[in-house]
Image (tube, rainbow, N blue to C red):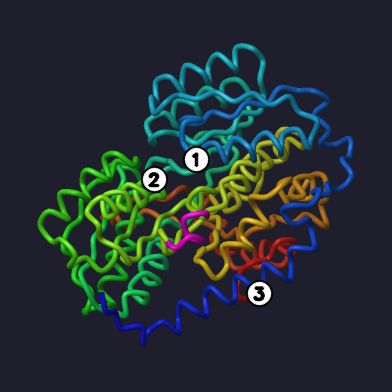
Amino acid sequence: MQRNHARRIKVASIVAAGTLLLTACSGDGGAGGTESTQSDLPESVDLQGQTVVSLFTSLNNDYYSSWDDGARDAVEAFNGNYVALTNEGDPATQISQFQQQVDEGVKIIFVTAPDPSSVPEMARIAEANDVCFANFWEQDPWVTPMDSGDSYVTYLSPNSVQAGYETATALFEEMGGSGNFVHLTGHPGGIPDYQRTLGVDMALAEYPGITLVDRQPGEWNREDSRTAMAGIISRFGPDIDGVFGQNDDVAIGALNALQEAGIEDVPITGMDGNEGTIDMIESGDIWGAYSSIPQWSAGFTFVQALDYCQSGETAAPLNRQLWTGGIFVTAENAAEYKETYLSGDLPFDWVKMSKVAYPDEWDPQNKVEIMNMEEMWAYTGDEDVDLNPDYLADLPNADTLNAEWDDHWTLLRHDSE
């Protein structure tokens, strides 16, 4: 199948910048494949065996297995006793687990929720019991941690609209700016699913030569995605020029269907950056994937809860809702990504992430920025929402706080600056 590659300059520059900066920073702060170095642990953040709990969906999923690895590594860096509990996608189970751990005296709990429905109850329980609670990915639109009090310390999420847009743009460039495009989504209704789709649609609006021939739910798993892709192949056959998978498992399901149909050389993208996917990128089976760096996401989320628990000081309102960054991986930087993040010890200096431990020299070790609520929840179409007054009062400080996050990021720097 012939493709026009005349418009690949933009993609090449993105990948090259990430590769060069990973190389430049991998020796500073610990690269994968070498023993990671932790800064000295001050008494102020030494947990001395205190139990810390992470609640997440499943260990039968590469993303959450990576989350678990990062969570354990980070908690143990602070001398904590790490406990992981999974809910297999059931919000009621997660709430029950949260309550049980609170009843047993646990004071630090950090989570990813299967959907937003369990978050308000966990926030209520945390506030009623002085539990330090931090949450990654899911949240009810327009709701803030400040609405629940101080104990819901931080809500964090990748900027899924931007990640979806950048990934789709890279894929469309690889397609040469034209061709038939298939989008396999996750489960309809979830925030990451909706926002990634919004990002894809933003990219589509900029590429009139790209034709969206079908969009089907892949349900975040390989089998449903394979079935959906097989149905699309039955109608379009080899006239498919690119596939966007809403996560890595969806991308692999699409790949399986294409391979079963004997169709080759179709660029496919995923969103997770799991180790198995990176292997497939190196082998050429998957073209690219956006990684939100799940190991880092887990550890950084834990540190937000830890800092509040150990200091009792509530962060500025804008610092309680944060967007987090990631890395787009192709064959050009896959080996370096694996060496840095997936080989040997994790590269993160978890203790250095703590503002309590290192009030002057703390380092997030990934991009972090203030979450703009109007951008985050624009897809809801609600125009008359009363935003949290603490958020509004702090909003003039957004540029200053963003600059502070950026200035402190020195270890593992991988952006284009």
Q: Quadrant of residue 70?
A: top right
Which residue in the protein does label 3 denote?
A: 20
Q: Measured along the vertical axis of the image, is residue 200 above or below residue 78?
A: below
Tell me the chief SS of the magenta region: helix
Residue 374 appears anywhere in the view: no
Q: Residues within 10 Å of mark 3 (few under 14, many from 20)?
A: some
Q: Amino acid at mark 1?
A: Asp
What numbered label is drawn on residue 249?
A: 2
Which residue in the protein does label 1 denote?
A: 62
Query: In which quadrant will I find the N terminus?
Result: bottom left
Taking the magenta stretch, the answer to whether it contains residue 263 is no
Q: Amino acid at mark 2?
A: Asp
Please give the count of numbered marks on the rendered protein.
3
- Return the residue nearer the eye: 195 or 211: 211
Q: Residue furthest front?
A: 262
| First along the sequence among labels 3 and 1 | 3
> Residue at left 68%, top 33%?
72
| First along the sequence among labels 2 and 3 | 3
Which region shows up in magenta?
A: 279-284
Q: Amino acid at mark 3?
A: Leu
**In terms of secondary structure, where does tag 2 sit?**
helix
Q: Measured along the vertical axis of the image, is residue 90 above or below residue 19?
A: above
Q: Residues within 10 Å of mark 1 (few under 14, many from 20)?
A: some
